[in-house]
Image (spheres, rainbow, N blue to C red):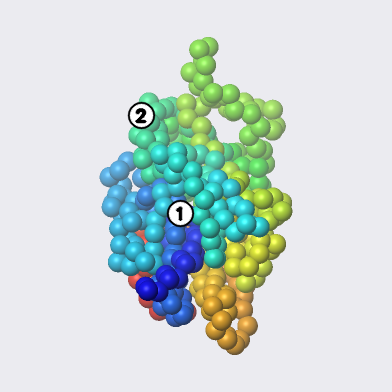
C-alpha cells in the first residue's frame, strides 16, 4: 500500500505588501526548509491585488506615468514567487472576509466572487491600512488605482484650485508634487510664488505641518511649499465636504473654524484606516489595529497567530519599522513551528522594540526635501538622494524578489 500523504499545514499570510511579501519570502527561505517534512508546509499568500505597489511613491505617478518607471512601481506577485515549489507556495487572488480564530480558518472571496474557507496551521495578518483617498494607495486592485489616476489627471488639467486635507507626509508630498508640476517654483530669492496658476491649499488641525518632525524642519518644509504656490492653513480641520452638484461645479469644504473653501479637486490625506474589518473586535485595540505582543503574536487569538506591518499595534506606520519587524516575526514563527512539530527548541522569543527616534524623510517636489533620521536632521540634498529622486523604488527590487532576505537575521 502507498503511504498516506501527510496533511498540508497552511501558513496563511493575509496581505501582500511590504510586510506580507517579505514574511512569505523569509519563511520560504529560512523556516520551511528547517522543519521536519518541509513538503507538508505551504505558504498561502492572499491579496486582493495581483501586483505589489510601492505605496509611498503614489504622490508622483498619480500626476503622470512618465515620472517613475511603471515596471518598478507595480510588480507581479505570482512572478516574484514563481521560483518556489508549488508544494510550498500558493497565491490566492482574494479578499479576507472573516477570521474565525477559534476555528482557525479564514473565509475569503476571490475576484470572481467565489467564497471559500482556508484553514491554517499558522496565520500572519499583514493586511495593512487603507488611505482615505483612492489616489494614494492600493485600496483594491492595481487596475482600479490606475483608473483613479487617469480620471484625476483629466480633472487636474482643468483645475484652478486644489484643497488637500492633512499635514502629514502624504499630504505634504502630494502638495509638493502638484505645486511643482502645476505652478513651477519661484526664484531663489523669492519667499513665495506670487500668482500661482493653481491655488493649492493644505489644511491641518495641527499647529505645524509634519508633526512627526521638529518645528524648525516643519517650517523649512512650509517655506519650500510656498515657493510652489502652496498655502498652509493650520489649527483647523475639515468637518464637512459637499461634492459638486447641478447648482455648482466645485467642492465645498467646511472647516472647523467656520470658513468654507471652494475647490475643483479635494484630496483627503488624513491618516489611514487599518484593514481589520474581518477580525473580531476582541483582537483589536481602540484605533482598529491588531493587538500584538512584543513577539508580534496576536493577543487572544490562539496558537501561532501573528500580525505585522501597518495593521499591527507594535509600531507607528512606517516602512523602516516593518522591515525591522519582519526578522523578529519570522524567528518566532519558525520557533513556534518547530515546537509544534515536536522539535525541542532552546532560547526565548525575539522581541520587537520600536525605534522612536525622530525618523522621517519628506520630499518636497522633485528637487528638495526635509527630514531626519535617528534623531539627526538630514539636508535637502540627502533627502532627495535617499527618497526624493524615485520615492524608494531603488530599494524595492530586493524586497519584492526576496533577495533582501537571503540571509537570516
Label 2: which residue? 154
Q: Examine the rendering and report whether any part of residue 319 can be seen.
A: no
Q: Is residue 141 left or right of residue 316?
A: left
The location of residue 202, given as percent across then percent down, is 55, 39
Could you tell me which secondary element the residue under label 2 belongs to?
Answer: helix
Asked if residue 334 is positioned above or below residue 199 in the image, the reply reads: below
Label 1: which residue? 46
Asked if residue 147 is positioned above or below residue 127 in the image, the reply reads: above
Instruction: Tell how many labels.
Output: 2
Could you tell me which secondary element the residue under label 1 belongs to?
Answer: strand
The location of residue 172, given as percent across then percent down, is 51, 47
Estimate how packed mark 2 is, as few (under 14), some (14 to 19) or many (20 or more) residues with alpha carbons within 10 Å.
Answer: few
The residue drawn where x is 49% and y is 43% is 115
Q: Examine the rendering and report whether any part of residue 351 can be seen.
A: yes
**Residue 321, labelled with which disc?**
none
The location of residue 94, given as percent across then percent down, is 45, 47
The residue drawn where x is 50% and y is 39% is 133
Q: Are marks 1 and 2 in contact (CB under 8 Å)?
A: no
- Tell which circle, 1 or 2, labels the residue nearer the N-terminal end: 1
Q: Is residue 162 left or right of residue 203?
A: left
| Nearer-the-camera pick, 51 or 376 | 51
The residue drawn where x is 28% and y is 52% is 71
| Nearer-the-camera pick, 234 or 174 | 174
Residue furthest top in the image: 247
The residue drawn where x is 51% and y is 69% is 326
| Nearer-the-camera pick, 263 or 123 | 123
Estimate how packed mark 1 is, as few (under 14), some (14 to 19) or many (20 or more) residues with alpha carbons within 10 Å.
Answer: many
Q: Nearer the viewer, mark 1 or mark 2?
A: 1
The location of residue 367, given as percent across then percent down, is 37, 53
Q: Is residue 83 left or right of residue 277?
A: left
Disc 1/disc 2 C-alpha distance (Å):
33 Å
Amino acid at each position: 500500500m502507498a503511504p498516506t500523504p501527510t496533511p498540508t499545514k497552511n501558513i496563511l499570510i493575509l496581505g501582500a505588501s511590504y510586510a506580507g511579501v517579505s514574511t512569505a519570502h523569509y519563511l520560504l527561505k529560512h523556516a520551511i526548509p528547517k522543519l521536519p517534512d518541509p513538503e507538508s508546509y505551504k505558504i498561502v499568500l492572499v491579496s486582493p491585488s495581483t501586483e505589489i505597489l510601492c505605496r509611498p511613491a503614489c504622490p508622483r505617478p498619480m500626476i503622470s506615468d512618465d515620472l517613475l518607471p511603471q515596471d518598478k512601481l507595480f510588480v507581479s506577485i505570482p512572478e516574484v514567487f514563481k521560483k518556489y515549489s508549488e508544494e510550498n507556495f500558493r497565491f490566492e487572488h482574494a479578499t479576507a472576509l472573516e477570521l474565525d480564530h477559534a476555528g482557525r480558518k479564514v473565509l475569503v472571496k476571490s475576484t470572481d466572487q467565489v467564497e471559500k474557507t482556508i484553514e491554517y496551521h499558522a496565520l500572519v495578518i499583514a493586511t495593512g491600512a487603507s488611505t482615505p483617498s483612492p489616489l494614494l494607495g492600493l485600496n483594491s486592485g492595481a487596475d482600479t488605482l490606475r483608473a483613479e489616476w487617469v480620471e484625476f489627471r483629466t480633472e487636474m488639467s482643468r483645475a484652478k484650485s486644489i484643497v488637500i486635507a492633512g499635514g502629514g507626509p502624504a499630504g505634504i508630498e502630494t502638495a509638493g508634487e502638484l505645486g511643482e508640476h502645476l505652478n513651477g517654483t519661484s526664484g531663489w530669492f523669492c519667499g513665495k510664488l506670487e500668482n500661482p496658476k493653481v491655488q493649492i491649499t493644505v489644511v491641518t488641525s495641527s499647529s505645524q505641518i509634519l508633526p512627526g518632525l521638529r518645528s524648525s524642519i516643519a517650517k523649512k518644509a512650509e517655506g519650500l511649499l510656498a515657493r510652489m504656490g502652496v498655502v498652509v492653513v493650520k489649527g483647523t480641520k475639515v468637518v464637512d465636504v459637499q461634492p459638486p452638484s447641478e447648482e455648482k461645479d466645485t467642492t465645498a469644504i467646511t472647516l472647523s473654524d467656520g470658513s468654507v473653501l471652494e475647490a475643483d479637486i479635494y484630496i483627503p490625506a488624513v491618516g489611514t484606516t487599518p484593514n481589520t474589518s474581518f477580525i473580531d473586535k476582541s483582537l483589536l485595540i481602540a484605533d482598529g489595529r491588531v493587538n500584538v505582543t512584543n513577539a508580534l503574536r496576536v493577543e487572544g487569538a490562539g496558537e501561532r497567530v501573528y500580525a505585522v506591518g501597518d495593521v499591527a499595534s507594535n509600531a507607528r506606520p512606517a516602512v523602516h519599522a516593518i522591515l525591522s519587524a519582519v526578522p523578529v516575526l519570522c524567528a518566532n514563527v519558525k520557533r513556534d513551528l518547530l515546537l509544534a512539530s515536536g522539535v525541542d527548541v532552546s532560547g526565548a522569543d525575539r522581541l520587537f522594540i520600536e525605534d522612536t527616534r525622530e525618523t522621517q524623510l519628506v520630499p518636497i517636489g522633485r528637487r528638495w526635501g526635509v527630514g531626519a533620521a535617528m534623531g539627526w536632521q538630514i539636508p535637502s540634498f540627502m533627502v532627495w538622494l535617499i527618497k526624493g529622486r524615485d520615492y524608494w523604488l531603488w530599494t524595492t527590487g530586493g524586497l519584492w524578489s526576496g533577495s533582501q532576505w537571503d540571509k537570516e537575521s
